[in-house]
Image: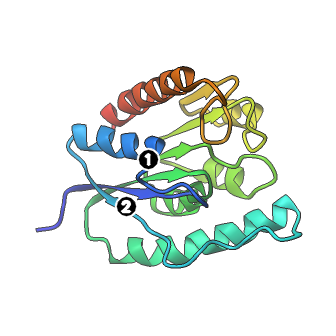
Amino acid sequence: MPDERLALLIPGHGYTAERPLLHFAGAVFEKHGWDTREVRWPEPPPPRDDQDRAAWFARLTSFVQAHVGPILDRETAPRIALVGKSMGCFAASFAADRGLPGVWLTPVLRESPLPADLRRATAPFLLVGSAADRSWEPEVARSLGQPFYETEHADHGLETPDDPVNSAEILRQVTLAMDSFVRTL
């Protein structure tokens, strides 16, 4: 019998499911009765090289779609949620196409195709980012009409340099936001 509810944990460029944001996302889903599965990249994602950000993000989007699409095509769980970190958020196109809820941790909202996919979404999603992260676009996050958590001074990993206590507090706040969101699914 297939699992009834499954959350796929989709890593970033260098951020695996063992790292805190995805680890605690998985723990939150499990707390609410979901099974979780970690996606692992079978090869390294494309490097940036000398590309501008928009071109690189387009390549990363293709990479994510090429690897996550077959996983979703094989999945038999009747309810699926996607949880992506940074580059993994480019799976939002699948969420939009298939009506899947999502948790998007530090999504690349600037100079990427991601906002268009988020605007097409019909299922609820949660955005999490930092105003100090140059990939985050606060106005875009606010314009989507979905819940979001924003911190002020954290980096792209939602950590604050030289302040692990504050980093842990941010992780706590993000985990609370995820818990509140997943409870509604």
Q: Is residue 136 above or below residue 172?
A: below
Q: Secondary structure at mark 2?
A: strand
> Measured from the top left, where is residue 58 in percent x and y?
74, 68
Name the residue nearer the viewer: 17 or 37: 17
In the rendered structure, which amino acid carries the disc numbered 2? Glu
Q: Is mark 1 in CB contact (under 8 Å) with mark 2?
A: yes
Q: To which residue does mark 1 refer?
A: 22
In the rendered structure, which amino acid carries the disc numbered 1? Leu
Question: In which quadrant will I find the C terminus?
Answer: top left
Q: Quadrant of residue 172?
A: top left
Residue drawn at x 66%, y 67% as measured from the top left = 61
Residue drawn at x 41%, y 52% as measured from the top left = 18
Question: In which quadrant will I find the N terminus?
Answer: bottom left
Q: Secondary structure at mark 1?
A: helix
* Count of picture labels: 2
Left or right relative to 11: residue 80: left
Q: Find the distance from the CA under tag 1 to the CA under tag 2.
A: 9 Å
> Measured from the top left, where is residue 117 in percent x and y?
64, 55
| Residue 38: mark in rendering | 2
> Measured from the top left, where is residue 20 in percent x and y?
44, 41
